[in-house]
Image: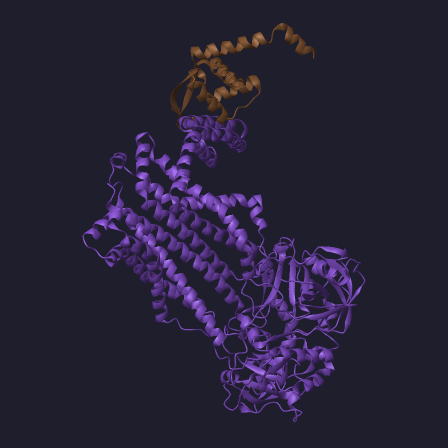
Chain colours: A brown, B purple
Amino acid sequence: MQDLNLTEEMILWAVWKLGDNAYGVTIRKQLSQRTGRLFPYGTLYGVLAKLTRKGLMIKTTGDPSPVRGGRSRNYYAATHQGIGALKAALELKQNLWDRESQVDLGRS
Amino acid sequence: MSSQMKRPPRIAAWLMRNIANRDERASILGDLEEEFHEQSENSGSLRAHLWYWALVLVSLPSFVQHIFYWSSTMFKNYLTVALRIIKRHKGFSFINIAGLSVGMAATLIMGLYVQHEMSFDRHHENADRIFRVCVRLGEENTHRGPFTVPPMAAAMKEELPEVEETVRMSIWPRNYLIKSGENAFLEKGIIFADGSIFKVFTLPVVLGDPDTALTEPFTVALSQKSARKYFGSSNPLGQSLRFEDRGMDFKVTAVVEDCPATSHFQYEMIASLSSNANSRDTSWGGHTYFTYLLIKQGMDAARLEAKFPDFVRRHWGAEVEAETGMRFEELVQQDQYRYSYFLEPLTDIHLSPGVEGADQLSIKGSRSTLYIFSTIAAIILLVACINFMNLSTARFVHRSKEVGVRKVLGSNRRQLVLQFLGESGLLALLALGIALSFTALILPTFGRLTQRQLNLSALGDPRTWPLMLALAALVGIIAGIYPAAFLSSFHPLRTIRGGRSGNPRQHIFLRRGLVIFQYAVTFCIIFGTLVVASQLRFLRHRDLGFDQEQVLVIHRASALGKQGDAFKQELLFYPDIFTICDTGTLPGRHYDDNGHRLEGRPANEESPIFTMYADSRLMELLDLSLLEGRNFSPDIPTDWTSAVIINETTAKEWGLVEPVGKRFHKEFGDYQDGDFVSIIGVVKDFHFHSLHHRIQPMIIRPLSDREWAYTSIKLRSRDLRATLGRIEGSWKKFTGGQPFEYSFLDQDFFGLYLREYRSGTIFSVFAAVAVAIACLGLFGLISFTTERRIKEIGIRKVLGARVSGIMYLLSREVLILVAAAVGLASPLAFYFMHRWLERFAYRIPVHPLMLLTTAAVTLGIAFLTIGYRALKAGLTNPAEALKHE
C-alpha cells in the first residue's frame, strides 16, 4: 500500500482521534489545535474524498441542522485499513527517528 | 445580539456553491455556515463575514484544481475530435475561421479606435477638474461655442471661490512664418496662452521655469520637436525667434514635451498671450478667447455654473444697458443665447459636436461616427457568428453518430453542450490569433483614413489580454450556443440507427430566419453606401451660386504688406490671370458673426449676421451677380467707411422690400466712423458655408488692412504649372523670399465634406467585408445542401429535368428568403438614411428607385453566390452522382 503523505496523515489522524464526532468543522479545529495549521476547506475535502475513495475512511450523513443552514453533516470514520495506514505511518516515523538521530538533530 | 438570523455573505456562498465539487457541496457549505455562526457569536458579524470570505478565497484554488484533474482526460478527447473536424472539413473551417477572424479584426480595430477617441485629454493630471467656458449661440446647427471675452478669466478667478486657476488661449488656425537665423518655417501649431497654462494643464516642462515662462509679452515655449528644428542641439533658452507676420522677436523661455496625439489642442509652440494687445482688453464685447477653468478639489461644476448669470450681470450689465437703453434682465430673456455661459468638461470636448470653424487647431471626434463604426463592427462579427450557426446546424448529420455514441456511453447533455461550446470556442481562439495579425496589417491604413495615430501597442499590453480572451469566449458562446443545444438534443437510438433525428423543422425555421437577417443587413449596408455616395456626389456637383473653378487662394497674403498693390499690378499683366481680389475670409472658411440692427428698430431687435470683408473685385472673382444696387466703388470714398452689400437671404429674413439705401446701426465701435452703415447693393445668394447649413444672412464689407488674410486669383490658364510658377516668382520678389502658400478654392470647399468622405470610405470598406462574409456563409450553406441532394438531382436528371429546372429547384428557397429580407429591411434602411441625410441642409431625396436598385443588387449578389453551385450541380453527369451504392 502506498504511504500517506503528511497532509493525508494529519487528516486521517484527526478523523481517528475524533471518533464519532469527525466532520468538517471539528476536523479543522482539531488540526489547528494540534498543529497550528488551518486547512482551507478545499484542501480538506479534497483529501477526505481521496481517503474515502482509497477505503481508509467511510462517510456517513447526519441529520440536517438549522445552524448549518438546513444542511446535514458528513461524518467520517477511519476504517481498519485507515487505522492500519496510521500505524504504518507511525512505525515509519519511529524507525526513521531512532534515539540516535534525534540526539544528532538536536545537537546540530 | 441575535445571530440566529445571520446568513453568510451571499456572493461568497454562491461562489462556493458553484465551484465546489458536487458530492461535497452541501457538506462544505454546512461546515462553513456552522463555523460562521460560531465566529459571529464570538467576534461579531463583520469579522465573521471577513473570515468567511477569506476562507472561501483560500479554498478556491484546490477546487479548481480538482475540476481540472477530472476533466483533463475528457478534454484531451474533445480536443482531438475538434481538431480532426477542423482538418477534415476544410471548406467549413475556412468559412468559419475566415469570417470570425475578419469580424474579430474589425472589432479589435474598432476597440482600439474607440479607446483612442475616449482617451482624449485624459493625460492631464487634473482632467476631471478642468472645464472650458462656452457661450450659447443662436445659430441653428451650432448652439454652443467655446468663446469668451478677454477679461472674464481674471474676474472669475478673483470672484468665484470655486475657481482655483484659469487660463486663456487663442487658438486660431493661421500659419506663422517663424525664423531663427537661416532656419525659416511656416508653423501651423502656434497657440497663444496665459502663463497659467502650466498650472491648469499637465504640460511637462523640460527646460525653463514653468512659473515665469510665459508671463512676459513676447516669450514663447517650444515643444521638444520644434526646439530641435530651430536650434538643433544647442540650448534654446534665451534665444530668440522672429515671428515674421508680427514683425516681433519672441524669446524662448521654456521647452515642453511634445504634444500628445490625444490632446484636443495641438501645439508646436506656445506663445505668451500677453503679446496680443487685446489680451488686456477690459471690454466685455468681443468673444475672442478660449477660457479654461481649473476648479478646486471637491467643488461642484453645476454649482459654479449657477453663479454665472449673476456674474455676467455684475460685469456686463452696465455696459449693455448703456448701449441698448434696456434692462439687462429683459435682454437676457429676449435674447437668451447671447449672455448665457456654461461649462464643458475637458474630457467631453473631443467628442462634443462643436462649432464649425471653432476648433480648428484641434482634432475633432464625433460620437455618432463612433457609434456607427462600432455598430458595423458588431454586425460583421454577428454575421460571421450566424455563418457558424447555420453551417453547424446544417451539417448535423456529420455529428449525429458521434453524439449518439457519446450518449450511449454515458455523456449527459450538459457535457455535450460544453463539448460543442468548447469547439466553437477553439475556433474563435484560432480566429483571434489570425485577427491579431489582420489588425496589425490594417491598422495603419485605418489610422490614415481616420487621421488618428492609432497604436498597436495596446494589443500587446497584458491588461488587454483578458479582454481579448473574453471576446473570443463571447464569440464562441454566441456562435456555438444554438448548435450545441441542437446537436446535443439528438436521441441516441435514432442517430445510431440512422435516418433523421432531432426536430429538423424547428432548426430549418431558425436557419431561414438567420439567412433573412443576414440579407436584411446586407440590404441596409448596400443601401447606406449608395445613399452616402449619392449625397457626396450631389455635394460635389451642386451649384454653389459662385464659380469655384480655377480660383487660386494665396494664404498669409498680408505678408505682402505695402507691396500688395505692386504685386497685383505685376500679376494682372499676365493674360492668364483674370482678376485678383483681397479678402478676409472665403467661402467655406470661418465667418465672424456680429450683431446688427436696422436703423429705427429697438435695441432688442439686434441679430447676428455673418460678415465677409472683401474688396470690390469679389464679384468678378466668384462670378457673383448683384440683384439690386451697385458694387463698392474705389471712386466713392464713403464706401470704405460706411457701405455694405447684403445677400438675398438678409433681405428676405429682415423683410426688406427695398433694401438699397436702408441703414444699419454700427455696433461695438467696429465700423470706423459715423453711426450708420448703408446698404448699397444686394448680392444673389451663394453658399458661403458648406451645404450642411442653409444659407444665412451675411453682409460683405470693404476690406481694411487689418482684415486682409487671403489674396485670391481667378485664373484662365491652360498651363497651370507655368502660371503657378510665375505667381510664385512674383510673390518671392515682393515678399523678400517668404514661402508661398496656396490652395485652390474648389478643393478647400470640398474639404468641408472630408469627414463625411472619410467615414464614407471606411463605411463602404466595412460594408463590403460584411457583405462578403454573408455571401461566404450562404455559399457554404448552398454547397452543403447541394451535396446532400446530389442523388435527388441525379435521379431528376435521369428522368429528364433540365439544367434550368435544377437551378430553380436549388435556388428558389434562398431567393425567396432574400426577397423577404429586402421587404423587411427597406423601411428600416429608409429611416436610418433619412436620419443621416438630415444633417445636411441641402440633400438628395431618398428615391424609391434607390430602394429598388438596392433590392436588385442584393438579389443579384445572392443569386451569384448560389448560382455557381446550382449550375455546377445541374451540369453534373447523373451517372457520377448515382454510380455509388
Provide residue B873's location: percent of width, then percent of height.
29, 52
Work out whether residue B679 or residue B768 is closer to the camera in this orientation and state it.
B768
Query: Residue B506, how many percent across, how many down?
Result: 27, 47
Q: Give the residue at x 52% y 70%.
A: B753
For this rendering, which residue is in front, B659 or B442?
B442
- Is residue B476 shown above or below A60? below
Query: x%, y% of residue B606?
Result: 57, 80
Give residue B348's quadrant in the image. Answer: bottom right
* Residue appearing at x 35%, y 41% in the figure: B484
Image check: B490 left or right of A105?
A: left
Most extreme residue toward the left, as rendered?
B799
Q: Quadrant of residue B448?
A: bottom right
Q: How many marks?
A: 0
Q: Position of residue B375 (x, y in %)?
A: 45, 57
Left or right, B28 with reference to B119: left
**Residue B249 visible to the viewer:** yes
Extreme-bottom residue of the structure: B635
Res B611 quadrant in image = bottom right
